[in-house]
Amino acid sequence: MKLILLGAPGAGKGTQANYIKEKFGIPQISTGDMLRAAVKAGTPLGLEAKKIMDAGGLVRDDIIIGLVKERIAEADCGNGFLFDGFPRTIPQAEAMKEAGVDIDYVVEIDVPDETIIDRMSGRRVHVASGRTYHVKYNPPKAEGVDDVTGEPLVQRDDDKAETVKKRLDVYHEQTEVLVGFYSQMAASGDSKAPKYVKVNGVQAVETVRDQV
Ligand code: AP5
Ligand code: ZN
């Protein structure tokens, strides 16, 4: 099974990915997590990406497409995968089509901008695993630490209010077009086209999970 989770920053892609990957036994491919790992490791990509991410912009398409193509060629992707935060532009989506990657489902998690800021300010993450919590809506079992490893949780550098606003603008300018791109593909009747599913993301985490 090959899935795309589509949605604005803070819509809950990472949160839902956590359940989906367990349920279907497929790896989560989060380009955001991959970039944050590169930043942490201090690689040349990480150094370049950090500035862009902190400013709320998008990393160049050719870099991202290269990263993803390498990742989906790995052995654990044989039974499929879950894209989280990718594709994010038309060229990224076209690159997957050209590479013959047939997506089974595109799941859009729909959340209005007003809700996003509140979610981002309370978000806490476990950097090594990408596990995500919210101080109010999805708290860890013990305050400030990851449920699985007991390691400390941190705030993401790009979760400052002004950066979140910029990320939302970029989403509306460059990523939201993918809603039309994939829903038109789904409606085309082509047997290789993905099915398109839209879920209301302004519901409890468990309700969204059940609907997804
Ligand atoms: P990325 O890491 O992909 O960030 P994003 O798309 O902005 O999405 P987020 O991770 O912020 O949100 P999410 O939808 O995963 O929400 P979450 O589940 O955490 O990208 C970061 C940056 O990397 C980009 O800005 C860009 O610079 C670069 N980048 C990445 N991919 C790229 C690409 N393909 N091309 C170019 N550049 C790229 O939830 C958010 C919070 O809400 C959490 O606290 C959570 O606990 C809470 N929450 C979740 N669901 C609910 C709910 N139902 N009710 C209440 N609270 C909830
Ligand atoms: Zn995420």
Image: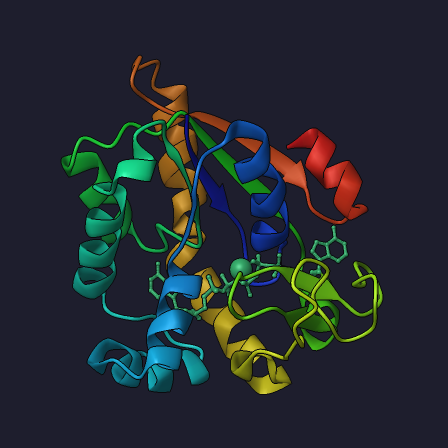
Position of 60 with respect to 193 (left or right) is left
Q: Position of residue 82 (x, y in %)?
A: 44, 40
Quadrant containing the N terminus is: top left
Ligand 1, seen in the image, is in the quarter at bottom right
Position of 127 with respect to 111 (left or right) is left
30 w.r.t. 192: above or below: below
104 w.r.t. 199: above or below: above
Give me the residue at 21% from left, 35% from top.
97
189 w.r.t. 159: above or below: above
Location of residue 73 (image quadrant): top left
Q: Is residue 193 visible?
A: yes
Q: Position of residue 191 (x, y in %)?
A: 31, 12
35 w.r.t. 137: above or below: below
Location of residue 14 (image quadrant): bottom right
Quadrant containing the C terminus is: top right
Q: Is residue 117 visible?
A: no
Give me the residue at 67% from left, 77% from top.
152
